[in-house]
């Protein structure tokens, strides 16, 4: 079992990274491997809605989305962490998620997902909601914790002092590990989900 922990902050070793390190350590204690994937500090292009991915199976823009999706094929769960910018997630993380889910949503479909946000003070719950929406429209069970998955602080050192936030990260990791193991047992027993009928669009696309 493997979980990819995505650091969606342009700051590599900042608050988001510290939160993900806490998750990684707790996952390891539960026997689950993890990998921290940093988006980097270069601009991430928006989705062009060109339809290329529907024909060729990958995004036409070459800036790391394909690399992530290649890793995602072998992953069982995902944690996307991002900083709060004006009560929402950063533009870079939003563009990344738009293109990952539009061009490669089928790779993540059915796998576990969790959101983590980092803020100095407020705006965290709306940013948290921003990320969770991607899971909820892609049939991804959302992993929860004992509180909203957030840490507080302006710097990595501040997050170290956020004992409640770090505890929330550990609970999130243990819940992720528990659900991964439960799903593995379900597969061994032949338990699968059933979907009846075909999705019908209501926006009158012909």
Image (cartoon, grey):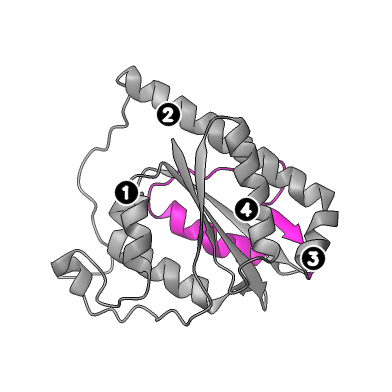
Q: Is any atom of residue 173 visible in this view? A: yes
Do the residues under discs 2 and 4 have CB atoms within 8 angstroms? no
Element at label 3? loop
Q: Earlier in the sequence, mark 2 or mark 4?
A: 4
Q: Position of residue 197 (x, y in %)?
A: 20, 42
Q: Earlier in the sequence, mark 1 or mark 3?
A: 1
Question: Residue at horizontal 50%, vertical 39%?
Answer: 33
Q: Which marked residue is nearer to the observer: mark 4 or mark 3?
A: 4
Residue 30 vs 22, above or below: the answer is above
Q: Position of residue 144 (x, y in %)?
A: 61, 43
- Cα distance in 3D space between marks 4 and 1: 20 Å
Please report the bounds of the magenta region as a residue range: 126-154
- Cα distance in 3D space between marks 4 and 3: 15 Å
Q: Earlier in the sequence, mark 2 or mark 3?
A: 3
Residue 71 vs 39, above or below: the answer is above
Q: Quadrant of residue 194?
A: top left
Decide: few, some or many residues near mark 4? Use Cα within 10 Å; few <14, some 14-19, many ≥20. many
Q: Quadrant of residue 101?
A: bottom left
Q: Position of residue 66 (x, y in %)?
A: 31, 65
Viewer-proximal residue among 86 and 155 = 155
Q: Position of residue 104 (x, y in %)?
A: 30, 60
Q: Earlier in the sequence, mark 4 or mark 1?
A: 4
Q: Which residue is mark 3?
A: 153
Decide: few, some or many residues near mark 3? Use Cα within 10 Å; few <14, some 14-19, many ≥20. some
Q: Which marked residue is nearer to the observer: mark 2 or mark 4?
A: 4
């Amino acid at each position: 079992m493997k979980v990819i922990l995505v650091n969606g902050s342009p700051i590599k070793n900042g608050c988001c990274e510290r939160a993900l390190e806490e998750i990684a350590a707790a996952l390891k204690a539960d026997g689950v491997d993890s990998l921290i994937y940093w988006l980097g500090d270069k601009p991430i292009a928006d989705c062009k809605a060109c339809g290329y991915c529907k024909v060729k199976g990958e995004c036409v823009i070459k800036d790391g989305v394909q690399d992530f999706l290649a890793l995602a094929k072998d992953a069982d769960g995902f944690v996307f962490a991002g900083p709060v910018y004006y009560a929402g997630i950063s533009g870079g993380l939003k563009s990344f998620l738009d293109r990952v889910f539009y061009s490669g949503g089928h790779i993540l479909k059915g796998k576990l997902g969790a959101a983590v946000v980092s803020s100095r003070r407020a705006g965290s719950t709306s940013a948290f909601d921003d990320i969770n929406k991607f899971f909820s429209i892609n049939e991804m069970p959302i992993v929860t914790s004992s509180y909203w998955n957030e840490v507080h602080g302006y710097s990595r050192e501040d997050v170290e002092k956020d004992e409640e936030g770090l505890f929330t990260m550990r609970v999130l990791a243990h819940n992720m590990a528990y659900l991964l193991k439960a799903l593995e047992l379900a597969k061994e027993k032949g338990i699968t989900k059933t979907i009846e009928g075909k999705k019908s669009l209501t926006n009158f696309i012909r």
